[in-house]
Amino acid sequence: MNLWYSKEMLVQGLLQGEKSCIEYIYREYFPMVRSAVGFQNGSLADAEDVFHDGLIIIYDRIRKDGFKLESSFKTYLFAVCRNLWRRRLERKYRLMYKMENCISEPSFDYSHVNNFEEEEAEKYRLYMKHLAELPDFCRHLLKLYIQKIPLGEIAGIMSYKDAEYVKARKYYCKNLLRKRIMSDPECKQFMNYE
Amino acid sequence: MNDIFFRSEWIGKFTDNELDQEQEINLLLMASENPLLRNELRMDREISEIFTDRKKAELSEMICNTIRNRKKRISNSPWLKIAAMVTILVASSSLIQVMRNHFSKTEDKITQEGMFTAEKETRRLFSLPNLKQAYEKTFNVRHKQLARVQSTTGNYMPIPEYELLTGANIRDQMLFLISPYGRLQCCQDSVITFNWHFLSECKPVIIEICDNQGKCVLKSEPLTKPPFIIQANFLQKGLYYYKVLNKDDLITMGSICIK
C-alpha cells in the first residue's frame, strides 16, 4: 500500500528510522536524484551514494536543535544531493567553476552543504559499507556491541567462553575493519589529516 | 618486538582506555613520529563513535538495504517478466496477423489483375525469409491460383509483329472496313460483325482469325458482299488477330481481345 507522507511526517519518519518512510523517500525522490546526478556524468552507483549521504546529512541536521524545514522535503533533499554531487565532481575532476557561469539560486542557500558535513557523510558510508562486508561473526559481534549489549551477554549469544574472549574478538574485528577501510582507495582522500 | 603486531592490538585498547600508562606513553611517542599511526588512531576513534550512535547506524543500514532490495525487486520481479512475455506474445501474434492480412490482400490482387507471372510473385514472396513460414500454409491454394492466372495471362500475350500491323492498311485501299475497330475488346457472349464497303471493284475477300500464337483458328470462304458475323463464344478467352485478305494479299489487320 502506498501511503502519502507530509514533510513533517517524513522528517519524523527519518528521525525515527521508519522503514516505510525510507522506502517512500527512495521510491518518490530517488529518480529525481538519479537524473540530476546522471545529468552531470554520474553513474547509478554515484546516485545511490549521493542519495545515502544526503539522507544522512539531513538526519544529522534534523537531530540538531532549531532545525526547521522551510521548503518541501523533496526540494530540500534535491538541493542537498545536488550540492553533494557538485562538491564531489569538483574534487574528482578538480574543476574550476567560474562564478559568472553559476546560476543564482537563492533557494539553495539554506541547503548549503559544507565540507565537514560532506566528508563526514562520505566517511560514514564508507565505514558502514566495510562493516557490512565483514565476515558474519565479526558483523554480528560488532552489531551486538553497537546495541550496547554487555560483553558477558554477547559471549552467551555467540557461544564464546567469556567476556574477555569477546573483547579480544572485538579488537580483532575492529582491526580487520580498520585495515579494510584503510586499504580502500576511496579512503585515501580522508587520510590527509596532516 | 614486532611494532606492527602490538600496534594493532594497542590501537583498539587505546581508544577504549584499556592500555596501562607505560603502553599509552609508548604508543603516543610512536604516534608523534608516525603520521600513519596517528591516522589509524583517529580512524579507530571514529569507528568507535559510529558504534556509539546506534540509531544512525541502523538508519544507514536501512537506507542501504532499501536501495539494494528495491534494485533486486525491480530486476527479479516475476510480474515484470510475465508482463514482458505477454507483451512479446501479443506483439508477435499481431505482427503475424498483419502479415496474413497483407498476404490475403496480395492474393486477391493476383486473382483480380492477373497480369504478372507466378515466377515473379513467388520470387518476391520468398525474398523475405521471415515470411516463409506464414506463407507456407496458404502456399498450395495460392500455387493453384497462380497456375490458373498464368494459363489465362498466356492467352493475352501479344505478338509484336502483328501489333505493328494492327489497324493499318497494307495494300491499296480496295475496301473500307467499317467494323470491327482496329483493336476490338469484347465479351464471350457478344457478336462480332465484319462489315466493309468496297471502294473500287468488288473482289472476294477472305477473313482469317489467328490466335496469339499465330495459329489460324478460323478462315472464311471468299466473301463477295458484307457482312460476316461470328459469335465470340466460338473463340476462347484471349487475344486474337483478324486479317482481311484478297487471295493471299493482306488488305488490313486488327486485334480482338475476348475477356
Image: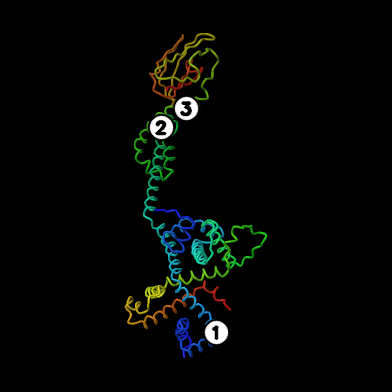
State the image coordinates of residue A160 (x, y, percent, origin top left): 33, 80
Asked which quadrant contains residue B206, the reply is top left
Amino acid identity at mark 1: Asn
| Disc number placed over residue B108 in the picture, else none | 2
Q: On screen, B198 above or below A167?
A: above
Look at the picture and state if B218 lies above or below A38.
above
State the image coordinates of residue B89 (x, y, percent, origin top left).
38, 47
Task: Return the residue nearer the eye: A87 or B242.
Answer: A87
At which x and y percent is residue A128?
A: 46, 70
Q: Are marks 3 and 2 in contact (CB under 8 Å)?
A: no
* Real-space CA distance between mark 1 and mark 2, rounded to the nearest whole angstrom: 93 Å
User: Dot 3: what SS?
Assistant: loop
Give the number of the mark in front: 1 or 2: 1
Report the front residue among B128 and B35: B35
Secondary element at tag 2:
helix
Per the image, label 1 sits on a secondary structure element best described as loop
3 vs 2, front mark: 2
Q: Residue at coordinates 34% horizontally, 40% vertically from top-left?
A: B137
On the same chain, marks 3 and 1? The answer is: yes
- Picture quadrant where residue B170 is located: top right
Considering every residue shown, the one lying at the far front of the view is A66
Q: Is residue B43 visible?
A: yes
Image coords of residue B168 (percent x, y)? 54, 20
- Discs 1, 2 touching: Cβ within 8 Å: no
* Same subunit, tags 1 and 2: yes
The answer for how far apart the CA atoms under marks 3 and 2 are is 25 Å
Is B35 left, or right, of A140 in this rendering? Answer: right
Q: Which residue is mark 1?
A: B34
Residues under labels 3 and 1: Cα distance? 107 Å
Q: For mark 3, what is the residue?
A: B158
